[in-house]
């Protein structure tokens, strides 16, 4: 009876998977098996996933090309990149590069991700984050490595089987901390309720005000991509930087903007100069951190305080 059951499961996966051996151009079907639980005692699909991962690792050890397959998984509210990687026995960078996860600290709870059975790096043809850009630039410079073009779902990647991120890429991947945007400043208004210096009425202040002389350099508080620059009657000249999928920073009342949309920035990038544009009573930087679309106290996210 057990033999028949195992044979049925094996046949099921043969017909379910669009399996293939590596070639120069690979295409995969988006109809991947769906894992409901990362517990093989509760989910036969995950049990099969574990067996496929183990087989791929054995193939690598024997210098064989492993069969590349994919599964779908909807993360729980308690899942993070580390826990999923450990439970699936797949490298963090493999899961991250396939699913556009920019750092281990990124919130990936209640999100559908694709889980491969083979370790390696999935380099997107259309990088979004600084990590993806530097990965694309550096991977193709590596000597004597195997890579394949592959379509996963509807997105095209170059897959580097068995490869790991190196020191430069790891710096971008791991450095998710944010820092003060001004080298020297005076805090003149905190996050929270305050009396508005413009209207004289009680109003919630969604960021912090940092006073500094006009023309003082304003730096990006972390690695990211410029999402938007512009003018607002209240905030004056402003810049918005996207750091990962759930965090962005906002810099307002600038006298000058020194970046443009889609520029890649880091903590050494001067994005503008302190000013007093918009509704302002003097030279200062209005600085916000936005997390999961909510404006939070910036000081809870900064590492250099």
Image (cartoon, rainbow, N blue to C red):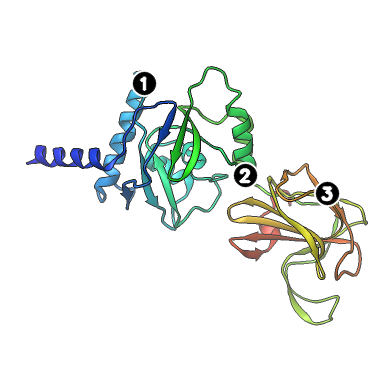
Q: Name the residue under label 2.
A: 129
Query: Secondary structure beneath disc 1?
Result: helix
Q: Which residue is drawn at the image coordinates 77% and 67% (left, top)?
A: 190
Residue nearest the observer in this picture, 38 or 234 = 234
Q: How far across and down, in percent of the image, does residue 42 sit?
A: 25, 51
Residue lying at the far bottom in this picture: please name it: 201
Residue 18 visible to the viewer: yes
Residue 40 visible to the viewer: no
292 relative to 281, above or below:
above
Q: How far across and down, in percent of the image, does residue 218 sit?
A: 82, 51
Q: Nearer the viewer, mark 1 or mark 2?
A: 2
Q: Which residue is drawn at the image coordinates 57% and 44% (left, top)?
A: 103
The quarter of the picture where residue 275 lies is bottom right
Pointer 1 local density, CA inside 10 Å: few below 14, some 14–19, many at least 20 = few
Q: Nearer the viewer, mark 1 or mark 3?
A: 3
The quarter of the picture where residue 118 lies is top left
Query: Secondary structure beneath disc 3?
Result: loop
Image quarter in which the N terminus is found: top left
Query: Secondary structure beneath disc 2?
Result: loop
Find the distance from the CA under tag 2 to the CA under tag 3.
20 Å
Q: Mark 3 points at which residue?
A: 258
Mark 1 vs 3: CB contact within 8 A: no
Q: Name the residue under label 1.
A: 61
């Amino acid at each position: 009876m057990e033999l028949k059951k195992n044979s049925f499961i094996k046949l099921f996966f043969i017909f379910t998977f669009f399996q293939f051996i590596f070639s120069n151009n690979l295409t995969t079907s988006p109809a991947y098996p769906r894992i409901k639980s990362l517990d093989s005692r509760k989910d036969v699909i995950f049990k099969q996933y574990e067996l496929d991962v183990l087989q791929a690792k054995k193939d690598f050890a024997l210098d064989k090309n492993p069969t590349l397959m994919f599964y779908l998984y909807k993360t729980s509210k308690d899942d993070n990149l580390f826990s999923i990687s450990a439970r699936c026995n797949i490298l963090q960078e493999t899961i991250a590069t396939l699913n556009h996860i920019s750092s281990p600290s990124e919130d990936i709870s209640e999100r559908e991700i694709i889980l491969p059975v083979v370790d390696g790096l999935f380099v997107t043809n259309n990088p979004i984050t600084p990590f993806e850009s530097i990965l694309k630039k550096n991977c193709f410079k590596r000597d004597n490595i195997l890579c394949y073009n592959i379509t996963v779902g509807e997105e095209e990647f170059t897959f580097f089987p068995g490869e790991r991120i190196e020191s430069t890429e790891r710096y971008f991947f791991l450095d998710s901390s944010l820092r003060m945007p001004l080298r020297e400043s005076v805090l003149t208004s905190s996050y929270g309720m305050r009396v508005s210096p413009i209207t004289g009425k009680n109003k919630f202040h969604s960021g912090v005000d940092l006073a500094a002389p006009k023309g003082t350099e304003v730096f990006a508080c972390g690695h990211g991509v410029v999402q938007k620059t512009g003018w607002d009657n209240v905030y004056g000249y402003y810049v918005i930087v996207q750091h990962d999928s759930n965090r962005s920073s906002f810099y307002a009342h600038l006298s000058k903007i020194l970046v443009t949309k889609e520029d890649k920035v880091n903590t050494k990038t001067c994005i503008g100069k302190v000013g007093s544009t918009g509704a302002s009573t003097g030279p200062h930087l209005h600085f916000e951190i936005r997390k999961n679309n909510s404006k939070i106290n910036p000081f809870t996210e900064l590492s250099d305080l």
